[in-house]
Image (cartoon, rainbow, N blue to C red):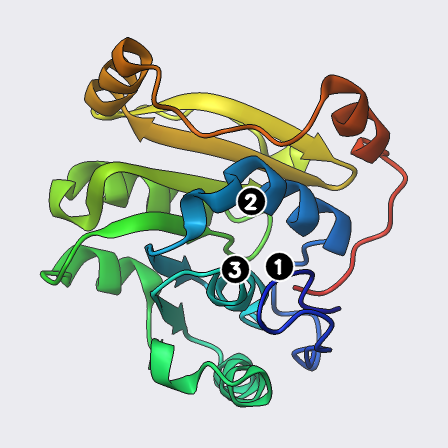
Amino acid sequence: MRVIAGKAKGRRLMMVPGDSTRPITDRAKEALFSIMGTWIEGTRVLDLFGGTGSVGIESLSRGADFVQFVELNRKAVETIRANLRHCGFEQQAAIERGDGFAYLQRYQGHPYDLIYVAPPQYQEFWIKALQRVDDQPALLAKFGSVIVQIHPREDAPVALKRLEEYDRRRYGSVMLIFYMTAEDLAAAAAEDDGWADGETQDEESAWDDPSEADEGA
């Protein structure tokens, strides 16, 4: 597992011992940041259920201003801290060891441009987290996005009031689902101001290999 591009390109990241964290493949991560393109530059990111910190660290490497990591597992927190130190991003990040749902419930700081949700698999935590964000308008900045990472087998309908799905991609065992407020989606469509998609359909199909093995994230 490595940082794919940007200031820390090529740096190897430590894995969290055991199987308590949700995996993401390097291929899926590369595709994700290809979709976001330069949009990630200058953003505030919340990496919820941070795991190894791979997505948040990739965001910093590609120009994000700040990443808040929230992770309950002690070994994962230690891994995130070590990976931030290794990549030189300690001053641009904060780590909170605690419950992600409680963090979302009580948060009163500056809104985030990107909230990345990748909780432990097969417990429907992603639905609970998404609904918690949906209930807290102050969490998400104008034109901010929530991206959920799940295994395709976890996919299920979600009742939401403000957030609306606007894209989904599958990369083997990783499914990414993209959400934005309905209001922002309508405004973005009117202004033709959505994210630039760096992938072609052929490239996406090439990634979509159901047999692909999981890698740590």
Q: Residue visible at 18% across and 53% down?
A: 111
Residue that carries the numbered disc 2 in the rendered image: 149
Residue 128, placed above or below residue 180: below
In-front residue for pair 36/25: 36
Q: Amino acid at mark 2?
A: Gln
The label on residue 38 is: none
Question: Which quarter of the picture shows residue 184?
Answer: top left
Residue 127's place in the image compared with 99, above or below, is above
Task: Assess whether mark 2 and mark 1 are in contact (beta carbons under 8 angstroms).
Answer: yes
Q: How many marks?
A: 3
Residue under numbered circle 1: 22
Q: Residue at x 14, y 59 (%)?
A: 110
* Residue 51 x %, y %: 55, 69
Q: Earlier in the sequence, mark 1 or mark 2?
A: 1
Which mark identifies residue 62?
3
* Earlier residue among tags 1 and 3: 1
Counting from the top left corner in percent of width and height, residue 175 is at 63, 36
- State the SS at label 2: strand
Disc 2 packing (10 Å; few <14; some 14–19; many ≥20): many
Mark 3 is surrounded, within 10 Å at the Cα level, by few (under 14), some (14 to 19) or many (20 or more) other residues, namely many
Question: Residue 125 at x, y = what percent?
Answer: 44, 49
- Residue lying at the far left of the rendered structure: 108
* Amino acid at pointer 1: Arg
Q: Measure how far apart labels 3 and 2 are at the Cα level.
A: 20 Å
In this view of the protein, which residue sits in the foreground, 156 or 184? 184
